[in-house]
């Protein structure tokens, strides 16, 4: 399957590049975090969110919308960094009305597309044997997807799919899967996304988020080949 990933939009317009490629791939997967930006106002965030919803509704079988922690910050009332208390109820209402359009993970071949990652320790703690159970679990027992702590950054093997960070994921990733994730920005002078990190359990992690949130990646889940999408 050929898939384009869209990392954490955070109210920005870079996701719109994916619309030009809808007919060239099997799926376009948004990796979550549609809300909260430290310099972009609510009205711009709202406009982009509404357009993303319309894009999903126009292409329901090709566009996949995943939850991010900055979305469940409102939907599950967690209030993570960047939280906008003045419009929190409005965002919650929109997410509640459209919650059926969102999932936590998308699985293709031996790839898991998810905001943060899936730890086998978290899976065991939540009582799940297979990652295909995760989306239904979110609908029935969403408390398992909240931030655990005590590490405020989320670098803990018991953090759920919306919070876990690459450091913990590399050690405790679910066996045999590759992961395409957002959530953790690549922000160093000698690394530009996408960045591939081998994990300890027979696969690798592909990080695509960065401070500009503009790194779209095309992935072939059968060959494991990937490349950054360069499109104006």
Image (cartoon, rainbow, N blue to C red):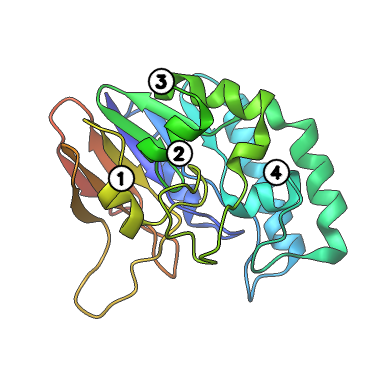
Nearer mark to the viewer, of 4 and 2: 2
Task: Between label 4 and label 1, give the one nearer the viewer.
Answer: 1
Q: Which mark is residue 172?
A: 1
Mark 3 nearby-residue class (10 Å; few <14, some 14–19, many ≥20): few
Residue at image position (52%, 46%) is 162
Q: Quadrant of the N terminus?
A: top left
CB under 8 Å between discs 4 and 2: no
Relative to 54, does residue 231 appear above or below in the rendering?
A: below
**Disc 3 target residue:** 129
| Label 3–label 2 contact, CB within 8 A | no
Q: Does residue 148 show up?
A: yes
**Is 113 located above or below residue 26 in the figure?**
below
Q: CA distance from mark 3 to mark 4?
A: 35 Å
Q: CA distance from mark 4 to mark 1?
A: 36 Å
Image quadrant of residue 23? top left
Kind of element beneath mark 2: helix
Quick check: 179 left or right of 114? left
Q: Which badge, 3 or 4, comes first in the chain's sequence? A: 4
Residue tagged by mark 2? 122
- Front residue (pair 205, 4): 205
Does residue 206 show up?
no
Q: Residue furthest bottom?
A: 189
User: Going from the N terminus, do you reach mark 1 or mark 3 first?
Assistant: 3
Q: Of the residues under marks 1 and 2, which one precedes in the sequence?
A: 2
x, y percent for residue 175: 25, 32
First in residue order: circle 4 vs circle 2 = 4
């Amino acid at each position: 399957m050929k898939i384009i990933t869209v990392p954490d939009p955070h109210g920005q317009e870079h996701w719109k590049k994916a619309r030009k490629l809808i007919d060239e791939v099997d799926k376009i997967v948004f990796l979550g975090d549609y809300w909260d930006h430290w310099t972009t106002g609510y009205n711009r965030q709202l406009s982009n969110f509404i357009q993303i919803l319309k894009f999903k509704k126009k292409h329901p079988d090709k566009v996949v919308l995943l939850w991010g922690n900055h979305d469940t910050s409102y939907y599950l009332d967690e209030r993570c960094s960047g939280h906008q208390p003045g419009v929190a109820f409005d965002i919650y209402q929109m997410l509640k009305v459209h919650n059926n359009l969102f999932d936590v993970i998308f699985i293709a071949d031996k790839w898991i597309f998810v905001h943060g990652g899936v730890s086998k320790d978290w899976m065991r703690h939540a009582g799940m044997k297979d990652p295909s159970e995760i989306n239904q679990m979110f609908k029935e027992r969403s408390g398992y997807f909240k931030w655990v702590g005590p590490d405020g950054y989320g670098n803990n093997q018991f953090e759920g799919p919306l919070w876990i960070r690459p450091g913990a994921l590399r050690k405790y990733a679910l066996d045999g899967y590759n992961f395409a994730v957002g959530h953790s920005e690549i922000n160093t002078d000698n690394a530009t996304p996408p960045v591939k990190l081998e994990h300890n359990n027979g696969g690798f992690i592909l990080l695509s988020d960065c401070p500009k949130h503009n790194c779209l990646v095309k992935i072939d889940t059968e060959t494991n080949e990937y490349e950054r999408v360069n499109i104006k």
